Amino acid sequence: MLQYLVILLDKTSTSFCHYKAPSNSPKEGRTLIPLETLRQGIRFGMMENLMIQYVYPDHELPEEYQEVLESIDHSKIKPYGQEDADVLVVDGFQQVKATVPVVLRVTKKELFAHQAEVAEMLADVPRLNVVLTDVETFTEADFEAYKECLTRLAANVERLYVDGKSPQLNLLTDRMMLSQMNNCGAGDTTITLAPNGKFYVCPAFYYENEADSIGDLEHGLDIKNKQLYKLEYAPICRHCDAWQCKRCIWLNRKTTLEVNTPSHEQCVVAHLERNASKELLQNIRKHGTFLPEQEEIKEIDYLDPFDKRDTWQ
């Protein structure tokens, strides 16, 4: 069931996930959402009882937009450096301090090179979501480097917990808190409205191909085979307990041509995070009671659940 409506306020609105948004330059085609389209989108969200998330570009909006934007409860996703945000997005590594959650979009190379600085950042933000923008390019050597990186980050998270702090790092702490899948929900619980007045499964589908819409404000939603966006129709994911995995629908289609089937790379990365979370949970509990209501994360002998398909019921 739909719960969220993401509204891109400009064609150059910041990316908060794996996809790349157009450069924030007039030459690259800034396209501000028309005011009437914005009003219609808000009206659609109200009629469907959806929570609205505005995604901002890295340039100021005209004054006349402010009253319309504030006409409904919402959250704001903005590039780092802007004020009055609910979530801030950082592209590429840089030192960050913030009082709201931060999305850090980095390549694997940037993460491996700056893992110590990322660890330090945990003390300066209430929550850090690291998004790897090139997951599909991971190699066996990268998997090993990522495993080592997670181990080092986990040691810093453990130290912060021992010091009485409560760091949140999606790669490590989310899985400890979850008892079921908690994915992005694109096409199922979340849809996107683009500046052209059309709906998309998520912003990535809009940026990749504007013709790939799932309806518009005039005619409503038209999601083909919409059951495929649901977890119960995901043949691999429904058997998986890497509950923190983003299960990115766009990456799925990009790498396997199926929206409900993830790539080997996406699965292995998610399971390396899962296993690191298991070790972190055990280590924190050595210092005292921690999340007593949560069960231990069980030991597994695989990194890609597809390898265990013969055991699926």
Image (cartoon, helix red, strand yellow):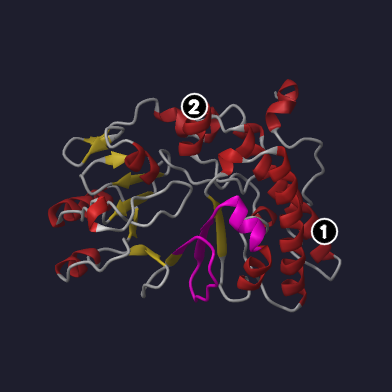
Q: Which residue is mark 2?
A: 258
Horizontal side, residue 276 vs residue 136: left or right: right
Residue 40 vertical placement versus 155 (above, below): above
**Residue 271 x/y as whole percent:** 70, 43
Depth check: give the residue in front, 310 or 125: 125
Looking at the rendered structure, the secondary structure element under dot 2 is loop
Query: Mark 1: few, some, or many residues within 10 Å (few <14, many ≥20)?
Result: few
Q: Is residue 24 above or below residue 187?
A: below
- Name the residue beneath numbered marker 1: 282
Q: What residue is shown at x 17% (from left), y 55% (from top)?
A: 39
**Tag 2: amino acid:** Glu
Residue occupying the far right of the picture: 286
Span highlighted in magenta in the image: 89-114
- Amino acid residing under circle 1: Gln
Residue placed furthest toward the top: 310
The residue at 55%/59% (across/down) is 129
Is 104 included in the stretch rendered in magenta? yes
The residue sitting at 39% across, 70% down in the picture is 85
